Image: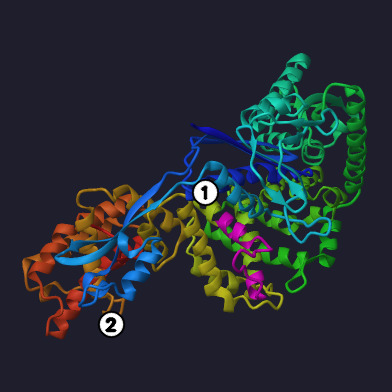
């Protein structure tokens, strides 16, 4: 008969951000434990609050399945001596299977008799299996941060205070440190009391009776509904930030949403400051009108009921007002100084003690961004805007507002720049140069901001590599991988030509020519930086589940241009199932293998038709000459592939009729020049030798 097992780990309050991942980990570990233990089940349901991680196993088998198997041992000639007596090999084998020689039977395997023993292992009951293994399920969990408590050496996310372990209505023994499992759980810290869980299926209802909504999804739905009710009652618009909702949900066990107010005078402060104060610092939901204008109200969620809710709202209002008062002071104080004053202060602000000041970084970025602006074809107006942005883009780091609200760097730079009369495009670029701030974060929308973002990230990566501070393993304290991935995403988004090594080398020359290296040796790190960026392209492809051989093909191409890698990957991925794809790739890779060893001047590939020995050579030559007129730098990768693929039958005929490695040196070199011409056009797509075609 199917059973239900309940495991609740009761803890001191956990940080909100670990609650959901931890209960999912508990479910995963329970699933693996039961699967490995051959104990069948139908489903595992999770419950979680700041004080508990719980799994409820439904449809659990009452015992393991019995295991019957036939095990083969040594051959008969080894198992018995000439007189038919059992040898040590036979006796040892049978004992190893929990049997005796009386249980041995002989069976032929390909004409040779072997020893066999039938074994039987009775399945243990669910209670026995759980008793033996649940402790490991609990104690072997991993968390981002762990702590010890009392005199114990054991570490966990927070001290374990109680454990409920029930198989239907029976307690399954578990003991961890000084905590012994029973059926007693704890209700809401202020509104509830200890409660006995009658059976594993009664868990959710029993906790509800002591003011704990154990189901995180139901708790979240309740919060969402309460916020919607407040919005409707006051004719407000409240955009529920899902990350904030998840965090708030993991801070409460019995939620009650309520509204609060703040003085309208604070609405003169930029919205971003107000929203940051409410959302990021106080975990409040902000309120707008129908036109998306911020209103002097907020919505918060209490871990409790409606008793004395007015006092709770007033307390939250006081806390928020104090923070907004600080923000208002810094906002007005910062405007008393010029942007140039702030820039001058950056001369004394360290970017890193091994690299130099923030001001020196800005000087390098000015050079890098100017070079990239020319390469990416920005207009003169955009170049001027970029130049001004690069001159000042870090100035807000030394403002009072950013000192108080570090998460507003870039945002306040935009606001203050515009207030001081700067071009709004300059302000936007200052804001956007930090983008993307996460692996899948928003990208810069303006070209000026995109170039500044790339320039800033290129400088950071090159500078840290130059002083030997490179990421290793999972250690990346300066977020260089994220910045490199950001470069890749921006380049892809903008469609800019970006040959990694070529650009890296050119930037180094520009920095040296403008005396902007500040004693950093960038040249020795050209290859490592290029490989680092290329690995981020590979990461992008891996994230999007592209075939590994297509990834290797475009990554290992000779030019290593980020834009071309993406284009080539798209084309190869789109055509991989074409009927002629295999034959086309095999034709290309054959000529690539031959030309790889050719010792010719790649700059002089003039083919002499007078040396042709058959019609196949002439036909291929004519087709290639015609193709050379069509294939230009502006030709799409799709059209290039289609055009090159049209050569396949001609290449096949060529190899059938032509002895490429002729004994005549002049004829042989002519053959190789003809093939090298095609190889150069093909190589733009990457190293096609990496493709696996069947």
Q: Tag 2's secondary structure?
A: loop
Which span of residues is magenta-colored? 464-487
Circle 1 residues within 10 Å: few <14, some 14–19, many ≥20: few
What colouring does the structure picture have?
rainbow
Q: Is residue 566 visible?
A: yes
Residue 32, numbered label? 1
- 414 relative to 466 in the view: left or right: right
Q: Is residue 445 visible?
A: no
Residue 398 falls in which quadrant of the image? bottom right
Q: Which residue is mark 2?
A: 599
Residue 12 falls in which quadrant of the image? top right
Q: Which sits in the foreground, 32 or 541?
A: 32
Which quadrant holds the C terminus?
bottom left
Sequence-first tag of 2 and 1: 1
Which residue is rendered at x = 70% and y = 31% of the image?
197
List the single residue furthest toward the top: 233
- 429 relative to 161 in the view: left or right: left
Residue 17 rendering spot, x and y as whole percentages: 70, 44
Q: Nearer the viewer, mark 2 or mark 1?
A: 1
Residue 664 lies, with reference to residue 377, above or below; the image says below
Which residue is rendered at x = 82% and y = 62% of the image?
346
Residue 288 lies, with reference to residue 50, above or below; the image says above
Estimate the spatial distance between the alpha carbons at disc 2 and disc 1, rounded to whole Å.
Answer: 58 Å
- 281 relative to 570 in the view: left or right: right
Which residue is rendered at x = 76% and y = 19% of the image?
230
């Amino acid at each position: 008969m199917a059973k239900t097992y309940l495991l609740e780990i009761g803890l001191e309050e956990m940080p909100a951000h670990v609650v959901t991942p931890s209960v999912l980990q508990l479910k995963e570990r329970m699933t693996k434990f039961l699967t490995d233990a051959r104990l069948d089940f139908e489903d595992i349901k999770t419950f979680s609050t700041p004080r508990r991680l719980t799994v409820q196993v439904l449809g659990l088998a009452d015992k393991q399945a019995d295991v019957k198997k036939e095990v083969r041992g040594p051959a008969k000639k080894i198992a018995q001596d000439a007189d038919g007596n059992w040898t040590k090999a036979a006796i040892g084998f049978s004992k190893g299977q929990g049997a005796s020689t009386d249980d041995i039977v002989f069976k032929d395997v390909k004409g040779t008799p072997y020893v066999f023993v039938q074994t039987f292992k009775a399945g243990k009951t669910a209670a026995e299996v759980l008793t033996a293994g649940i402790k490991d399920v609990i104690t072997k969990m991993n968390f981002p941060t762990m702590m010890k408590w009392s005199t114990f050496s054991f570490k966990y996310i927070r001290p374990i205070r109680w454990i409920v372990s029930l198989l239907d209505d029976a307690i399954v023994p578990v003991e961890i440190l000084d905590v012994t499992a029973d059926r007693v759980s704890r209700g809401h810290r202020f509104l509830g009391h200890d409660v006995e869980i009658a059976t594993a299926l009664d868990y959710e209802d029993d906790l509800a009776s002591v003011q704990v909504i154990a189901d995180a999804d139901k708790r979240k739905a309740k919060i969402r509904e309460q916020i919607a009710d407040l919005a409707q009652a006051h004719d407000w618009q409240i955009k529920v930030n899902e990350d904030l909702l998840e965090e708030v949900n993991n801070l409460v066990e019995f939620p009650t949403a309520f509204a609060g107010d703040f003085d309208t005078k604070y609405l003169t402060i930029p919205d971003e400051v107000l929203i940051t104060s409410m959302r990021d610092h106080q975990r409040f939901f902000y309120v707008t009108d129908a036109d998306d204008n911020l209103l002097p109200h907020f919505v918060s969620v209490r871990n409790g009921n409606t008793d004395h809710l007015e006092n709770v709202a007033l307390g939250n209002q006081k806390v928020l007002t104090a923070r907004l008062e600080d923000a208002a002071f810094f906002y007005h104080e910062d405007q008393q100084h010029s942007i140039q004053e702030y820039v001058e202060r950056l001369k004394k602000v360290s970017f890193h003690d091994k690299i130099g000041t923030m001001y020196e970084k800005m000087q390098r970025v000015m050079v890098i961004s100017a070079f990239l602006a020319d390469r990416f074809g920005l207009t003169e107006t955009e170049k001027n805007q970029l130049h001004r942005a690069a001159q000042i883009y870090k100035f807000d780091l030394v403002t009072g507002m950013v000192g108080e609200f570090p998460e507003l760097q870039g945002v306040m730079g935009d606001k203050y720049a515009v207030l001081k009369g700067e071009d709004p495009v300059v302000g936007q670029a200052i804001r956007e140069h930090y983008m993307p701030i996460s692996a899948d974060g928003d990208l810069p929308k303006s070209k000026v901001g995109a170039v500044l973002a790339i320039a800033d990230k290129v400088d950071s990566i090159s500078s840290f590599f130059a002083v030997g501070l490179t990421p290793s393993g999972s250690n990346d304290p300066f977020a260089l991988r994220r910045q490199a991935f950001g470069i890749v995403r921006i380049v892809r988004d903008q469609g800019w030509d970006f040959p990694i090594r070529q650009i890296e080398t050119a930037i180094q020359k520009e920095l040296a020519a403008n005396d902007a290296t500040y004693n950093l040796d960038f040249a020795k790190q050209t290859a490592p930086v290029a490989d680092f960026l290329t690995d981020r392209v590979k990461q992008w492809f891996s994230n999007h589940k592209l075939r590994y051989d297509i990834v290797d093909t475009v990554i290992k191409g000779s030019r290593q241009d980020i834009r071309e890698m993406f284009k080539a990957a798209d084309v190869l991925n789109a055509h991989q199932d074409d009927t002629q794809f295999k034959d086309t790739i095999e034709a290309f890779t054959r000529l690539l293998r031959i030309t790889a060893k050719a010792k010719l001047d790649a700059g002089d590939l003039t083919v002499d038709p007078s040396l042709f020995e058959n019609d196949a050579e002439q036909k291929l030559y004519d087709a290639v000459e015609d193709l050379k007129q069509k294939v230009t730098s502006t030709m799409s990768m799709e059209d290039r592939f289609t055009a090159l693929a049209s050569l396949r039958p001609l290449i096949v005929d060529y190899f059938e009729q032509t002895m490429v490695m002729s004994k005549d040196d002049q004829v042989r070199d002519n053959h190789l020049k003809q093939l090298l011409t095609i190889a150069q056009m093909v190589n733009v797509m990457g190293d096609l030798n990496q493709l696996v075609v069947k």
